[in-house]
């Protein structure tokens, strides 16, 4: 129940931007996330809090050795901290929201199903993140 409320809260936060977000959830590779672009050929600059949270999520995922649903729970907690501490504005913030449109459902699916498919998607998104953000 907590994860469903968290996911709903994050989705509502993402939608509150007033932008038209497309939800293409097709196949991903480590260098391409549908809908994301670079900042005039450069990576988007994230604030320290966002960098720290994505580093923590990448570490949590790479070091995880147990139950996949528990990993999903931990990543949901990290997402909650990310959202609660968000102070970013502007284009970098908007582009991060476009990334989260893919990442939040992947983490939620991992928490709810514990499937290898969901884990693969989370890992691919975390590998793609540094291609767009620094």
Image (cartoon, rainbow, N blue to C red):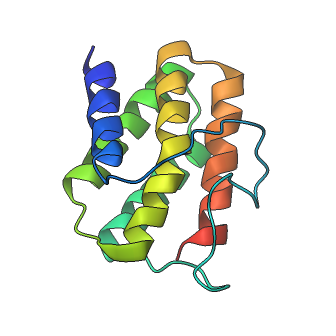
Q: Residue at x 76, y 45 (%)?
A: 28
Q: Which quadrant of the structure image shows residue 52?
A: bottom left
> Could one spot residue 67 in this view of the protein?
no
Q: Residue at x 61, y 47 (%)?
A: 62
Left or right side of 1 for 28: right
Tell me: residue 130, above or below residue 109.
below
Tell me: residue 104, above or below residue 53.
above
Front residue of 117 and 15: 15
Q: Residue at x 32, y 39 (%)?
A: 10
Residue 20: x percent and y percent?
A: 46, 49
The N terminus is located in which quarter? top left
Residue 104: x percent and y percent?
A: 46, 38
Q: Residue at x 43, y 73 (%)?
A: 92
Left or right side of 35 for 60: left
Residue 117: x percent and y percent?
A: 71, 25
Tell me: residue 31, above or below residue 8.
below
């Amino acid at each position: 129940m907590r994860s469903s409320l968290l996911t709903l809260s994050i989705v509502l936060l993402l939608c509150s931007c007033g932008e038209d977000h497309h939800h293409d959830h097709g196949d991903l590779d480590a260098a391409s996330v549908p809908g994301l672009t670079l900042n005039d050929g450069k990576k988007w600059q994230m604030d320290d809090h966002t960098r720290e949270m994505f580093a923590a999520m990448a570490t949590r995922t790479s070091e995880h050795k147990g139950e996949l649903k528990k990993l999903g729970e931990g990543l949901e907690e990290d997402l909650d901290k990310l959202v609660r501490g968000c102070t970013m504005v502007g284009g970098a913030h908007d582009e991060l929201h476009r990334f989260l449109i893919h990442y939040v459902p992947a983490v939620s699916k991992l928490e709810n199903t514990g499937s290898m498919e969901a884990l693969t998607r989370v890992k691919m998104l975390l590998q793609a993140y540094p291609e767009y953000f620094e």
